[in-house]
Image (cartoon, rainbow, N blue to C red):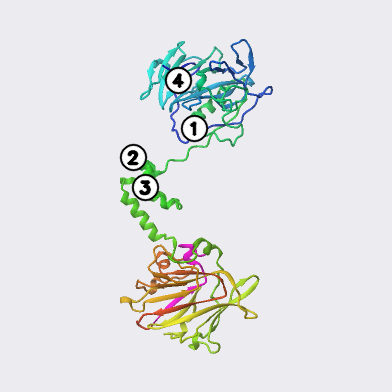
Amino acid sequence: MLRIFASTCIGALAAELADFEDEGLQLLQVAAKKHQGNNSHYAWSRGDGYCAYWGDTHTVQDYSGGRLPDPQQYGLFDLANSKDGRFKAQLYQCSAWHNPGIGWINAMAYDIDGTRVVILPPVMPIRQNNGPVYIRANDIEYTSAQLPFTIPNTNIEIRAHKPPYGFHIVTDGFDARIEMMTNTHPYTYVDTGIRLSPDNLPDTSENSFCSKGPSATPVADDGMDSDWSSSLFTNADHIRICDYCENYNSRSGAVRHLKCSKPPPAPPVPPAKVECDKNECSWAHSQQLCSSLQGNDVLYNDCLFDFCLECDDDAAIQFVAEDEDENPDPICVAGAPKCAPDEVCNEAVKMNTLTVTQNNLGGVGPDDGAEEIRYSNAAVINGRTVDLVLTTDGVFKTHKASKNGNSGAFGLLNVKCGTSVTVNMKVVDSENQQPVVLDKVALTWYDMDEGKKEKGRATVTTCGSTGAIISENTELTVKREGDCSSATSSVAGTGKDNPTSPHNLDSVQIARAVTLPFEGVSEWSSTLSLAKGYKGRNFLFALEPSVACGLNRGEA
């Protein structure tokens, strides 16, 4: 039968262990001070697999009679890792209070087939030179007064050795021996040696003192930004170790040789997880149900909390559905040759319709002169000011010509119910009136609703766009046929739900809008149609990628 055989003796472990939570295994980062002599790390190995690393690290003992230079570094070290990965041992080394060049082990940790056994220094300010050994195994506290005992749900037995301070760790499946001893010095330190079967020794490349050669190094670099995630100690363990290293060396007349940097406090447990734990709900399941909201911390946590209150899947599903309705994302209409909402939002040229200098589209007025609507100083493109000019080739029937032109930041066209009109939009240089080609531009039509009983149902048909972008909560019926997209209203609206800015739409307003992106154009057209109804209706537009940018992001 193969066994791991361990014996441990510690001189001043007479304090209760601190309560802790095993959160993240964050490891203490130590401002290490290397020995001014030989900085190499040495181990000694016989052919039978025996190796040693002694806690009073003036030397590393060679049983053939010699002594090797010791590592003399402070911090966390791997002691041994079996080749099959089932056995790991680590030690933590502090500086001695009376000599800044001497290191000593003040904590050990073992992992045996997933069972964690940890030996820690006393909780400060206690500094008892002799007393019971405190052992924690899988988060259960024991003392040497309870020996022997078997760790629950394992075959690992802790037996007394060299009373009152020592013990063995014994289990099936390994042939290893660990010895930890202390002497009568007034400061606590431990010695250790390990025996592993020859066919289970670490390779020489392993980061371990029990490798066959003088190449072992600390688990983490000495620097303050080291990654200590491989520690077998918990975050609370490292705080305790650091406290002991600092406080023991602060005794009267002593000089502190080592300053520890304690790890940051663990983040607070999310209230939703507390609720899940209290109600015995699955925290992992709640995260899966609410995963689509992870981009918004407030909504995500609210969704988690709704589930954890009663462990109710429907609560989270309903929350996600309501969020999709209140905070919808942009989506592409099927059949578009190219549709990339983020690209359209970030790269489309934006133009304004604030300055109307001519208003006589189709010759209906209210101005005389050129039969166009001209928005002057609509944008600056490559250092040149451009105008946006609207014209129509057919008959334009309007119910109230005085409304044409703009309404705030929107362009506005008033069309008589039961008619249609094709509107051409062209970008020209303000000085020479020559067409100006835009790499990317986006036209958005807003407030596409209708009257009661489908009176004045509105449709916009646009050809030549690279696609059509709508909100995932859209009220519009949108189709793509060839290179033309059509969007038709489906819900009755009132003046109270009209948008006031293309940059600040609510969920209802974005549901009644469609963005049509173009590339490499100087002009484009849309056909506006109204079903029979009462009087006329307004069509609002802007050269803004509003729907592509999503709710309340039109200014992005």
Q: Which comes before the other along the chain, label 1 or label 2?
A: 1
Q: Are marks 3 and 2 in contact (CB under 8 Å)?
A: no
Q: Secondary structure at mark 2?
A: helix
Instruction: State the residue lying farthest toward the right.
Output: 37
From the viewer's side, name the closer residue of 449 and 165.
449
Q: Which comes before the other along the chain, label 3 or label 2?
A: 2
Q: Are marks 3 and 4 in contact (CB under 8 Å)?
A: no
Q: CA distance from mark 3 to mark 2?
A: 12 Å
Q: How many marks?
A: 4
Residue drawn where x is 44% and y is 21% of the image: 135
Q: Which comes before the other along the chain, label 3 or label 4?
A: 4
Q: Which comes before the other along the chain, label 2 or label 4?
A: 4
x, y (%) of residue 21? 43, 33
x, y (%) of residue 322? 36, 58
Q: CA distance from mark 1 to mark 3?
A: 27 Å
Residue for badge 4: 174
